[in-house]
Amino acid sequence: MRRGFDSWLLLLCLTRTFLSLIFLTYAASLTILRPAWGMSATAAGSISTGFQLGFALSLFGCSWLADRVGARRVFLVSSVLAAITSLAFALFARSYPSGLILYTLVGISQGGTYTTAIMMVADRYEPRRRGAALGWLLASSSLGLACSLLIAGLTLPTGGYPLTFVVTATGPLIALVLGWIALRSSSNVVHHRGGDLQFRTEVLRNPRAVRLIVGYVFHSWELLAMWAWTPAFLAASLAASGSSAGRAAAGGAFVVSSFHLMGLLASSTMGRLSDRLGRRAVLLGLAASSTACSFVVGWLVSAPAAIVVAIGALYAFTALGDSPVLSTALTEAVRPAYLGAALALRSLLGFGAGAVAPLVFGVVLDATNPPGVAPAVWGWAFAALGAGGLIATLSAYGLRPQEEARQS
């Protein structure tokens, strides 16, 4: 096993960065798309839900398949599909029905590139360095999300959403080339399952694994809906300050791109910190902090921009910072032969919750604001995310500090 950052990890991280360019192009364009496509908040949320649900189902199937045919093989095939579907979305999504169908296909194609990357890193790096390695991997995705929003902020005022879609769709095309270079000399590892190993005992009856999966489910509920709606929330905050719709949408995208840079910092540091302080302590602190932010940030829509940005940056850091820690802890709690299956279950439940959460957010937003006008009350919608954060906090608290990670 490797012990530190190397060129292989650098290329894999760059691949994840370019794959992620398409992830938030819809969210960044939402303020423009709602009137252009004639969508209510509920309909707008359903497109994010379609993407996340497709991603969840794909994660489940691809993670399960990776245990049987190898993570490298699944990753490369999924990268090809991601490039094709991203280009189709950019060229042909011009209405609510086409946007819903094509963005869902983008989510389905991307699923095979996430947990398979985690599996390949887990195979390559020893446990005492694994948190840092997975932190860099997930930080690279945050960099892609930040760049996605930065691109949207630059292109929306000049070329509208069609230009934004096309530019961000080039990311998965570049990722396909980088991924092939990174993995061309890597082995396609398939771990042997002994006769005494079963999914039921390795995962379902493994208390630590179950708590980590539950924590991930409600971490995803909070994080993925926050990602989907924060650009629109910040655009509403800027509009309340007197900005035009186009400038507010661009400004919201720019600010949220900086939030994803905070997520990059969180992922790259919290995984390493958990290598030193332990997984439980870091998970508990981050989950409790992000939950508090969920219950506060929505009520600040009319607050001064400096306050909104400061709370939002803390929210971004804490909501994403536990991602590499949760992933690292699960690779240690489950034997390698069943890691894909454990990630499959986690992904189905976690991204399933993340798929429903943006829709629930939109429903609450519609219910707490008058119809036909721009939403002014956002606090209740964000509080719905905080409820999930509370459960994630309790799951982290329930982890035993003295429990030894199960090593292969």
Image (cartoon, helix red, strand yellow):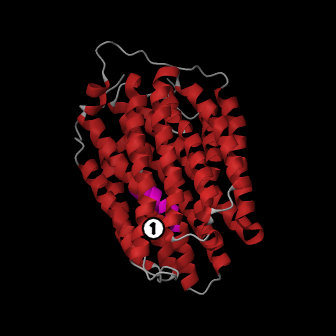
Q: In this rendering, would 195 be left or right of 378?
A: left
**Relative image position of residue 159 (x, y in whole percent):** 77, 67
Is 225 magenta? The answer is yes
Of the 4 image quadrants, the one containing the C terminus is: top left
Q: In this rendering, would 398 be left or right of 79?
A: left
Between residue 370 and residue 304, name the one nearer to us: 370
Q: In this rendering, would 270 be left or right of 201?
A: right
The boundaries of the magenta stretch are 222-230
| Secondary element at image label 1 | helix
Q: Is residue 283 above or below residue 383?
A: above
**Relative image position of residue 293 (x, y in whole percent):** 38, 67
Q: Is residue 278 visible?
A: no
Between residue 106 and residue 311, name the one nearer to us: 106
Q: Amino acid at mark 1?
A: Gly
Q: Is residue 361 visible?
A: yes
Between residue 12 and residue 169, name the one nearer to us: 169
Task: Tell me the chief SS of the magenta region.
Answer: helix
Is 387 magenta? The answer is no
Q: Residue furthest bottom?
A: 242
Occupied quadrant, residue 277: top left
Residue at the (67%, 76%) spot, across then down: 246
Q: Which residue is mark 1?
A: 362
Crowd tier of the residue under label 1, counting other residues whose Cα lies within 10 Å: few below 14, some 14–19, many 20 or above: many
